[in-house]
Image: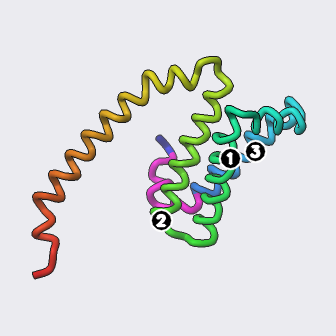
Amino acid sequence: MLMLPFIVLKPHKFALSYSIGNLLMMSSTLFLVGPKRQFQNMFSGERAMASGAYFGSMIGTIYAALGLRIYILVLLFIVIQFAAMVWYSLSYIPFGRQLFSRLVMPALKMCGACLTRVCGFCLARYSPTLLPR
């Protein structure tokens, strides 16, 4: 909650700090279990997709923050990075992904449907006034 204004006002600095923090977190697990075993675990069958998305989103976040400096793209990569981290972390909890899929996914689908209705209503109501005459 404390970092929320920082995300809105300076997302580039937050994105860099957040990505470096995640890299340090992954480095700490390398120290605990060893690099060879960590990489074997990360790129095993069920975790390979989540690991790739996690590291790809970290690289994308850093590139969008430092290279492109596009506000919306930085925020998008932060959200993708967070979702990939959650999915990767759930793979280490027995039945974590299945439980998440059964409990949280229906709620997210319902929120998405509500958001679609609200956006559709707003676009239908206000889009004629937004167009130039």
First in sequence: mark 2 vs mark 3: 3
SS type, badge 3: helix
Q: Is residue 6 magenta?
A: yes
Query: Residue 71 bears which disc, if any?
Result: 2
Q: What is the magenta range?
A: 3-13
Q: Position of residue 130 (x, y in %)?
A: 16, 71
Which residue is at 72% across, 34% downward? 45
83 displayed left or right of 91:
left
Between the C-alphas of marks 2 and 3, the distance is 24 Å
Residue positioned 75% across, 44% down in the render: 24
Q: Main secondary structure of the magenta part?
A: helix
Task: Decide: few, some or many residues near mark 1? Use Cα within 10 Å; few <14, some 14-19, many ≥20.
Answer: some
Q: CA distance from mark 2 to mark 1?
A: 24 Å
Looking at the image, residue 114 sits to the left or right of residue 23; the answer is left
Mark 3 is on which residue type?
Answer: Leu
Residue nearer the viewer, 124 or 24: 124
Mark closer to the chain start, 2 or 1: 1
Q: Check residue 24 in the rendering and tell me which mark sits there, or answer none.
A: 3
Q: Are marks 1 and 3 in contact (CB under 8 Å)?
A: no
* Viewer-nearest residue: 12 or 72: 72
Residue at the farthest front position: 45
Residue denoted by label 1: 52
Eye-nearest disc, 1 or 3: 1
Three-letter amino acid code of the residue under disc 1: Gly
